[in-house]
Amino acid sequence: MISSWVKDAISEINADYQRSADTHLIRLPLPGFPGISLYLKDESTHPTGSLKHRLARSLFLYGLCNGWIKEGTPVIESSSGSTAVSEAYFARLLGLPFIAVMPASTAKRKVEQIEFYGGRCHFVESACEIYAASAMLARELGGHYMDQFTYAERATDWRGNNNIAESIYRQMRSEPHPVPAYVVMSAGTGGTSATIGRYIRCQGYDTRLMVVDPQNSVFFDYWHSRDTTLRSPTGSRIEGIGRPRVEPSFIPDVVDEMLRVPDAASIAAAHWLETQLGRKVGASTGTNVWGALQLAARMRASGEQGSIVTLICDSGERYLDTYYHEEWVKQHIGDIAPWRAEINQLVA
């Protein structure tokens, strides 16, 4: 029988959801692309500032309903930052201890936000170490390892229930091209791309799903080879996306196309988008936008018209000391000027 605490916890999460509005869908003007519309689903407006707010809510409900999370259960997660920020929020909501296991290179602002919500950070040197360290902490503390990389695709109801895909299509209904030609999504766990891809097929839409993948990630190669043993010796430099191993939540067969995006192109696209929106976005958003602009150029060249939808994953304010710090970018990413020039030429 379900305990009164678990009942109350589920009710608390559901009440928090009812207090939240849907995120905006922004149409980005592209004068150089007649008949082609680009839309940005702005997930940075969630209470915890990123797309991962949806995932954290689903993972907590999944853990509660499976009997894995009980009163007083320490919750442990392996994360590069944004998921941990959102999970720290929900752990505080339920009065549970929370520990985030993350690479030491994680943006300082994310660490501060996790601590703001009462969470604790456990640092490892490499992104490849987060899985084992999280499992070990869970065993030592008698806690629950949330394991977003395994459970992201199954914790979310992909058939509907106001998931992100349903929200996109509902908001597109009055647009000139209401059914997108493409949805562009980067992958961290792979849960969001799985949700979108499954929803597209379930509803019978002709939309194609493109997943964009940064350097030092194995998803692109895995999609082509289906080799689950692939490993990368280093982690992605684009926080929140790209993985050094094939994650269980990444479902390749719902993905129609993949594009590998150079890190410098991701940063250049994020900086360019700031000039269009008047505010900063994270580097994973830059990866998305780079892919969307490549598709727009391809559609223009072939005389196609239609809409492209992608995501603003989080705010760039979290990355002022990294992706928006000139010296850091020069040292860790390189010269982004050629990529910025390519964008300017593309959209001219």
Image (spheres, rainbow, N blue to C red):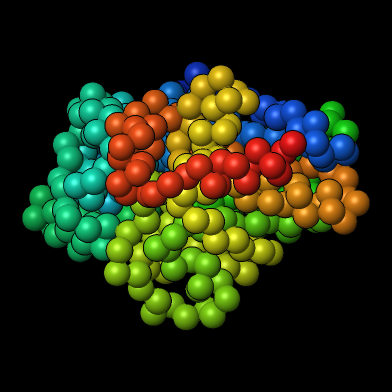
* Left-right relation of 162 to 107: right
* Residue found 70% across the figure and 35% down from its top: 39
Quadrant (top left/top right/bottom left/bottom right) for the C terminus: top right
* Left-right relation of 93 to 334: left
* Residue found 88% across the figure and 38% down from its top: 35
Residue 266 shows up from this direction? no
Tell me where residue 248 sits by quadrant.
Answer: bottom left
* Left-right relation of 121 to 321: left
| Residue at the extreme left of the image, as rendered | 140
* Residue found 68% across the figure and 64% down from its top: 256
Vertical side of 15 occupied by 309: above or below: below
- Residue 53's x, y, as percent? 44, 35
Residue 262 shows up from this direction? yes
Vertical side of 205 occupied by 326: above or below: above
- Residue 182's x, y, as percent? 73, 50
Tell me where residue 71 sits by quadrant.
Answer: top left
- Residue 34's x, y, as percent? 87, 37
Tell me where residue 224 sits by quadrant.
Answer: bottom right
Vertical side of 85 occupied by 205: above or below: below
Name the foreground residue: 338 vs 250. 338
Q: How many marks?
A: 0
- Residue 319's x, y, as percent? 36, 33
* Residue found 47% across the figure and 49% down from its top: 264
